[in-house]
Image (tube, rainbow, N blue to C red):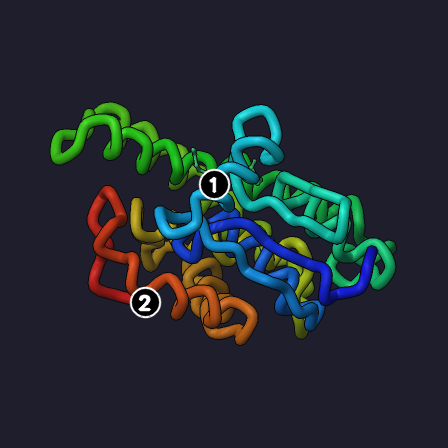
Amino acid sequence: MAGTAELALYGHPFSSYTWKAQIALHALGLDYDFRELGEEHPEHGAFVAERGGPQGLFPVLADGERVVFEASAIIEHLDEQKQLLIPAETATDVRMLDRVFDNYVMNVMQGGVAEAIKHPGNPDPAVLADVRAKLQRTYAWLERWLEGYARPDGVTMIECAAAPSLFYANWVDQIGDEYPRLKAWRAHLNALPEVSRCIEAARPFRAYFPLGAPDRD
Ligand SMILES: N[C@@H](CCC(=O)N[C@@H](CS)C(=O)NCC(=O)O)C(=O)O
């Protein structure tokens, strides 16, 4: 990895996958230039469109001349030397859980958001019901998984993926009292300094949450 002064992250403060990369940067104590997407910076959007993989998505990390897209790959790149976020002895489990949070929480939650964007004010109830059923199934699985999870003091790639996905999934389908461990873990994640920085930076954008942001968190 090149010197930290050369790090730049393209993303948006309200974007869950941007948080995932930012939490890793914060946990590793790395300085970075945050290149926010928006009308004021069309050059940032142009960079993401060109360098953000097949769909031109964000976040995108520029480390000197090296460009990395996909939040998990960004974390792998940042952690290559230190192996703090992906400890060698638990690497397979960490990667497996990272996939769980992306595929069965974050992307499912995003499906509900996409439906609300497609049909503003009139999302298809069947689509939302399907999203909520999938989230419930994952919540139940995570509740059982947490029983045996040796929670680290700090942050691994699991926490990087879990914090934003659970933050927003809870807005789409609230984690009920039947999942006490998951509820408590989400509260713990939100309180981590690496995460709360992201929550606070995103607060001004809450009115834009397509399904309506609940008055909590
Ligand atoms: N698999 C990608 C997903 C990235 C993603 O979905 N990014 C969203 C923001 S959270 C995005 O770029 N949205 C803009 C779009 O869909 O055009 C990753 O892990 O980084």
* Relative to 206, 22 lies left or right: right
Mark 1 residue type: Gly
Quadrant housing residue 113? top left
Is residue 22 shown left or right of residue 164?
right
Horizontally, residue 12 falls left or right of residue 98, namely left
Q: Secondary structure at mark 2?
A: loop
Using the rendered view, name the quadrant where residue 178 is placed: bottom left
> Is 45 positioned to the left or the right of 52 in the image?
left
Residue plotted at (65% across, 59% down): 149
- From this view, report whether residue 110 is shown above or below residue 208: above
Q: Position of residue 88 (x, y in %)?
A: 86, 54
Q: Tags 1 and 2 in contact by the CB under 8 Å rule?
A: no
Q: Residue at x 59, y 54 (%)?
A: 9
- Residue 201 spot, x, y in % from top left: 40, 66
Which is closer to the viewer, label 1 or label 2?
1
Q: Which mark is residue 217?
A: 2
Q: Nearer the viewer, residue 176 or 85?
A: 85
Q: Nearer the viewer, residue 99 or 93?
A: 99
The residue positioned 23% from the left and 43% from the top of the image is 211
Q: Tag 2: Cα neighbours inside 10 Å, few (<14), some, or many (≥20)?
A: few
Amino acid carrying label 2: it is Asp
Q: CA distance from mark 1 to mark 2?
A: 29 Å
Looking at the rendered structure, the secondary structure element under dot 1 is helix
Which image quadrant for residue 31?
A: bottom right
Q: Position of residue 60 (x, y in %)?
A: 60, 44
Residue name at image x 52 percent, y 32 percent: 49
Question: Which mark is on residue 45?
Answer: 1
Residue at the extreme left of the image, as rendered: 121
Q: Residues within 10 Å of mark 1 (few under 14, many from 20)?
A: many
